Image (tube, helix red, strand yellow):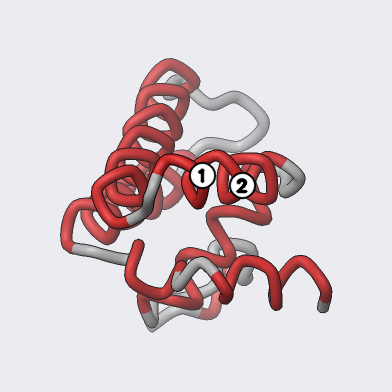
Amino acid sequence: MYRDTMLRLFNVDQLANERVVRALERQEQIDQLQDWYDGFSPFPMLHELAEAELKHAVESSALAQMSDQEYSAFRWQWSQLEPDQQRKYLCELAGLPDPERDRDFDA
């Protein structure tokens, strides 16, 4: 609750721009590909690249919208979240499905 309040003070909902949404969608596509494989994923490098792309998109969006002091405070708050929590939070802001959901029931 506290972290959510702090992040909202930085207007993080503005971070879910087109570039961030594309990066989130790319991660979702890679997750769907990985679901086709049982136990072994041939896509670990693609997954790492997609995570790095999302991180860069969020940071560049934040840097463009915030002052240096705000950006520094935002980065500290943001770094307190695990990458999967960051992704889930951004998906919620962008109106995308929860990345933790059970994809077996997706239509």
Check whether the beta carbons of the residues at disc 1 and disc 2 lie within 8 A of each other: yes
* Residue type, label 2: Ala
Q: Secondary structure at mark 2?
A: helix
Q: Nearer the viewer, residue 46 or 66?
A: 66
Q: Is residue 2 above or below residue 80?
A: below
* Residue 98, quarter of the rendered image: bottom right
Q: Residue furthest left?
A: 18
* Residue 16, quarter of the rendered image: bottom left
Left or right: 61, with 9 as reference point: left
- Give the class, few, some or many, for how many residues have Cα within 10 Å of label 1's Cα (few <14, many ≥20): few
Q: What x and y, as percent, mark residue 26?
A: 29, 47
Q: What x and y, as percent, mark residue 80?
A: 76, 44
Left or right: 75, with 11 as reference point: right
* Residue 43, quarter of the rendered image: top left
Left or right: 7, with 36 as reference point: right
Q: Residue furthest right?
A: 2
- Give the class, few, some or many, for how many residues have Cα within 10 Å of label 2's Cα (few <14, many ≥20): some
Q: Which residue is mark 1?
A: 69
For the N terminus, which image quadrant?
Answer: bottom right
Q: Nearer the viewer, residue 83 or 65?
A: 65
Q: Residue at x 39, y 54 (%)?
A: 28
For residue 83, the mark is none
Q: Which residue is mark 2?
A: 73
* Residue type, label 1: Gln
Q: Is residue 13 above or below residue 57?
A: below
Query: Separation of disc 1 and disc 2 at Cα?
Result: 6 Å
Q: Residue at x 55, y 39 (%)?
A: 72
Q: Residue at x 57, y 74 (%)?
A: 9
Q: Residue at x 30, y 42 (%)?
A: 57
Q: Nearer the viewer, residue 27 or 76?
A: 76
For the C terminus, which image quadrant?
Answer: bottom left
Q: Nearer the viewer, residue 103 or 99?
A: 99
